[in-house]
Image: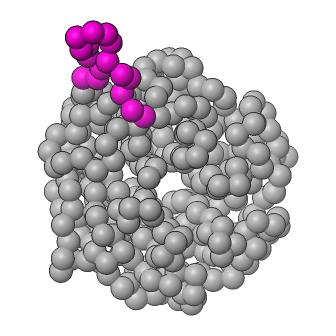
Amino acid sequence: MFFVAGCGGSSVGGPSAPPPPSKLFVADAANRAIGSLIDPNPAPGTLAVDRIVAGPSTGLGTPGGTPSVASIPSIALDAAGDRLYVAVQGSALVFDHIGTVNGDVPRSRSLQSVVNAHVVNFFGLHITAADTLYAVEPTGEVRVFNNASTLDGAVAPDRTITPNIGAAINSTFGVVVDAGQDMLYVGVAPSSSSIVVFNNAATANATLAPDRTLNFSAAVGSFCLDQDRDILYVAQSDGRIVSFDNASALATGTPTPNRTMTLTTITTSSKQLFVTVDTDNNRLYAVNGTTVFIVSGASIADDAMLGATQLTVSPASTLLSAVAVRP
């Protein structure tokens, strides 16, 4: 389990004030846990998390077997609602007041869905400011749930977008909605990695051919979008993160990156990083194994001027599989 920093304490004349809420959240797929930090931009070194959500009451599962990032393949943070959605494939678990919860706490709610006798796999998650949850299945179907913060138990999706790419989809690696541009981005892997883009994200509800398809020469395992700056960040399996300006206008084909970030000292045999971006503070976060990288000035960062904060989580059994942050 994560190493936990001491909190609280006492002072002369009365108890100390409670610690402030956490802002940075990481999923530990090996230990079935969610760790969080109060300071989203700590100094380099050994990472001491301030809070850990883990245990039988959480629904996150019991550690054991061969560790796999698929145990917790995605998390999605509703920053304004202080709410975290956690993908455990058969369900999406919901934790309210995520900034302050700590320990073996019961999940607030748990979402499951069955469509035509098919059990929906909540593999990749994205929550919008309008309280709409997008969940992409490994086979590419995107299930859309309105009023997500009120849902509990067995629920039916309000819409389904099924990508028609002319080939079977073997796996997916994320889903993102650009609300301002009304575009849906879905990471799919038939024989190679692509991000397919659909217009009219807020209303789409059919089997659709993508409006654009972005192809990549290296395999991709994660991506995120800075909606304010219209920058797409793509984490490749070779340990590099490539970024693309004017993401909403990228044409179908293999785009040329505007910048490349090569993050070193990867702590597992796999170099795959999982990424998110804090748009307000222009910081990129990437996790892998027992390592967290923080890149400030993300919109202009590249190898020529790359300065990343590197944090190491203890113990070595940790397997970081997702990251989320609020400003």
Return the residue nearer the eye: 104 or 128. 128
Return the residue nearer the eye: 288 or 324. 324
What quarter of the picture does the N terminus occupy?
A: top left
Q: Residue at x 32, y 30 (%)?
A: 50
Per the rendered image, the range of residues in magenta is 6-21
- In terms of secondary structure, what is the magenta stretch mainly? loop
Q: Residue at x 22, y 39 (%)?
A: 47
Residue 175 vertical position relative to residue 39 in the rendered view, above or below: below
Whether residue 308 appears in this view of the structure is: yes
Q: Position of residue 274 (x, y in %)?
A: 39, 56
Q: Position of residue 261 (x, y in %)?
A: 27, 72
Question: Would you say residue 284 sits in the magenta stretch?
Answer: no
Residue 67 vertical position relative to residue 272 in the rendered view, above or below: above
Residue 85 vertical position relative to residue 232 in the rendered view, above or below: above
Residue 188 vertical position relative to residue 245 in the rendered view, above or below: above
Q: Position of residue 12 (x, y in %)?
A: 22, 11
Left or right: where does residue 39 sit relative to residue 158?
A: left
Return the residue nearer the eye: 229 or 15. 15
Residue 275 placement: quadrant? bottom left
Q: Residue at x 51, y 33 (%)?
A: 98
Q: How many marks?
A: 0
Q: Position of residue 72 (x, y in %)?
A: 48, 40
The furthest residue to the top = 13
Question: Would you say residue 7 sits in the magenta stretch?
Answer: yes
Whether residue 31 appears in this view of the structure is: no
